[in-house]
Amino acid sequence: MSLLVLGLSHRTAPVGLLERASLTGDAPQRLLHAAAAAVPVGEAALVATCNRIELYADVDKFHAGVADLSVLLAEHSGVDLEELTTHLYVHYEDRAVHHLFSVACGLDSMVVGEGQILGQLRDALSLAQDQHTAGRGLNELFQQALRVGKRAHSETDIDKAGQSLVTFGLERIAEVSGPVAGLRALVVGAGSMSSLAAATLARAGVTELVIANRTPERAERLAATLGARTVAFGDVPAAMAEADLVISCTGAAGIVLGAEEIAAAAAKRSARTPLALLDLALPRDVSAEAHRIDGVHLVDLETLAEAAQSTAAGALDVDAARRIVGAEVDAFGAAQRAAAITPTVVALRAMASEVVGSELERLDGRLPELDGRARAEIAQTVRRVVDKLLHSPTVRVKQLAGEPGGASYAEALRELFDLDPAAVQAVAGAPARVPLQAAVGGDSA
């Protein structure tokens, strides 16, 4: 497997660009199919969060893979390729694995150590599985990344070094509005981030929790679990005027809370503290004009990105997590390299077995007078000799294959013993690559 990662995140791109590049509607599915159908690509997965958009692909050609995936990301995100390219990062093979494992541990998050990324990686894998764009390679890779992330969170205190984006945002709100406890809160949206926000507010002790969502049933289910009440989505402006804190994360393609609605809500408030708005959506739900409205305190992803740069996580916990990532990358690479040579070793032993069988048949023809016992003894002796001759080299080659550059040993075995590539491929159980459209019967665009 030759893993390629191509993407952009809060570390390489301004929030405004991430907002314009965000994938809405069925764009993630269409991008996945287009990526997996590209000529250099065998498998593909997409990680799309409010802080990053990354394509993971198994490619047979590095430069062609980078070129094709860059064009596809530009086409499906709607951002000009030239502008997008200046903010893209590319990782390949071990560096790509290292990047994914770091992401899983929260080391590459806006809020270092946050654990929500594990759920987002699970969602990314599920989407690729559902769309039939992830095969054995990416499945094993993402499953291992999830295990590495869990290990980092269980063996270090990186959870204390970081926190969820919701908690981080509420801390920025508290700097102006004071503690969340005792506030009246409105949550707009009922997806995973909004649900996390609502649950966090309930635990924090808000005096009132109101939930609004375009699909009322989802809002009602969430409200029932938290002892909250719901309002119709069309009544959000009126509910906003009665709230002290509004958190919005809907996944809508356009602005949900406009400047005029926010200004009107702020004007109706009699409280001295400003109306606090926390926008966790990408693209944004809350108009950026709210930053300039009197009586309003807006914290959005751009604000959080700036604050995160000045927030130091626990250095010891981060270092410990990084050591875990380094060790896991080495172990994963060694296991992958060792596994890659197994089909060649099996094919070699199968060829040796065929040669032994053929020679024993010739012996039967030349010495038909041999009795059954003698034939069995000769056959056992020949097979034992072949097994002994092959044992040490095949064990050693598996060990060597686990080291960096170990792939060359499989090639050496194939050349030295003139193994049929088709036989090795058959042992590996990997059918020849076919276009994704033919495999799933769908359109790539």
Image (cartoon, rainbow, N blue to C red):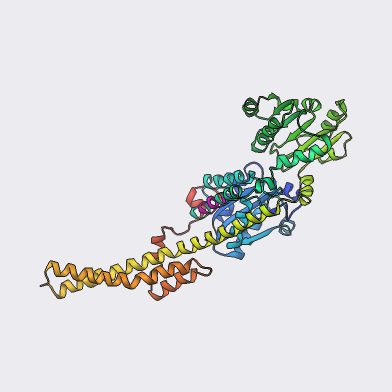
- Where residue 219 appears, x then y in whole percent? 65, 28
Asked if residue 143 lies in the magenta stretch, the reply is yes
Q: Of residues 73 and 148, which is closer to you in this image?
A: 148
User: Is 158 situated left or right of 402 in this image?
Assistant: right
User: Is 57 situated left or right of 248 in this image?
Assistant: left
User: Is 237 situated left or right of 140 in this image?
Assistant: right
Asked if residue 209 lies in the magenta stretch, the reply is no
| Residue 284 seen in render | no
Residue located 56% across and 53% down the image: 44
Q: Of residues 35 and 100, which is closer to you in this image?
A: 100
- Where residue 418 appears, x then y in whole percent? 38, 74
Residue located 62% across and 43% down the image: 26
Query: In the displayed structure, would residue 283 be above or below residue 314?
Result: above
| Residue at the limit of the structure toward the right, as seen here | 294
Residue located 81% across and 34% down the image: 178
User: Is 438 situated left or right of 311 in this image?
Assistant: left
- Where residue 176 appears, x then y in whole percent? 84, 37
Q: Main secondary structure of the magenta part?
A: helix
| Residue 361 seen in render | yes
Q: What's drawn in magenta, residue-wise?
A: 139-145
Residue located 49% across and 48% down the image: 440
Instruction: Count the marks.
Output: 0
Please identify the quarter of the rendering in which residue 262 is found.
top right
